[in-house]
Image (spheres, rainbow, N blue to C red):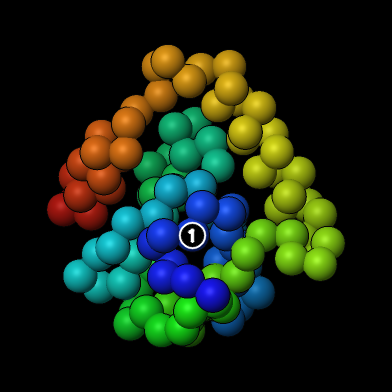
């Protein structure tokens, strides 16, 4: 498929414990990847910006440590997460001018992970 960081389609990360998150932004990190969840700016920082630790493998689906990253809604299998992503897209359309640019998001991720 493609490099995890060049895919523009929405992605879902699933953990071994059964939890999963929609990823709306993602950045490389020395220990894996950092991603932002939908409505990250309304969540406690530790819930909105997440480090998925581990080596990154694959070209779709991808593995990050024990987690698996796939395209969101592939074959209609994630309706609840697709709805969350659609709500996020709707919110972005309403506040696009005030939303941080990619470099600002990367800086937020770096600052959060220093703590």
| Quarter of the rendering occupied by the N terminus | bottom right
Which residue position holds label 1? 7
Residue 30 sits above or below residue 79 on the image: below
Which of the 4 quarters of the picture holds residue 28?
bottom left
Residue 6 in the image, given as x and y percentages of width and height = 41, 60
Q: Say which of 51 and 3 sits in front.
A: 3
Say whether residue 54 is left or right of residue 97: left
Residue 107 sits above or below residue 32 on the image: above
Residue 5 in the image, given as x and y percentages of width and height = 39, 62
Q: Could you tell me which secondary element the residue under label 1 belongs to?
A: loop
Residue 41 sits above or below residue 97 on the image: below
Residue 54 in the image, given as x and y percentages of width and height = 34, 80
The answer to whether residue 20 of the structure is visible from this angle is: no
What residue is rendered at 39% in x and 55% in y? 26
What residue is rendered at 66% in x and 43% in y? 85
What residue is rendered at 69% in x and 34% in y? 87
């Amino acid at each position: 498929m493609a490099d995890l960081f060049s895919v523009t389609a929405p992605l879902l990360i699933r953990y071994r414990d059964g939890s999963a998150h929609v990823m709306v932004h993602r950045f490389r990190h020395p220990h894996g990847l950092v991603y932002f969840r939908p409505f990250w700016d309304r969540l406690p920082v530790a819930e909105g910006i997440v480090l998925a630790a581990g080596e990154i493998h694959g070209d779709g689906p991808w593995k990050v440590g024990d987690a698996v990253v796939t395209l969101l809604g592939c074959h209609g299998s994630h309706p609840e997460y697709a709805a969350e992503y659609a709500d996020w897209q709707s919110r972005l359309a309403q506040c696009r001018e005030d939303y941080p640019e990619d470099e600002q998001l990367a800086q937020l991720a770096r600052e959060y992970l220093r703590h």
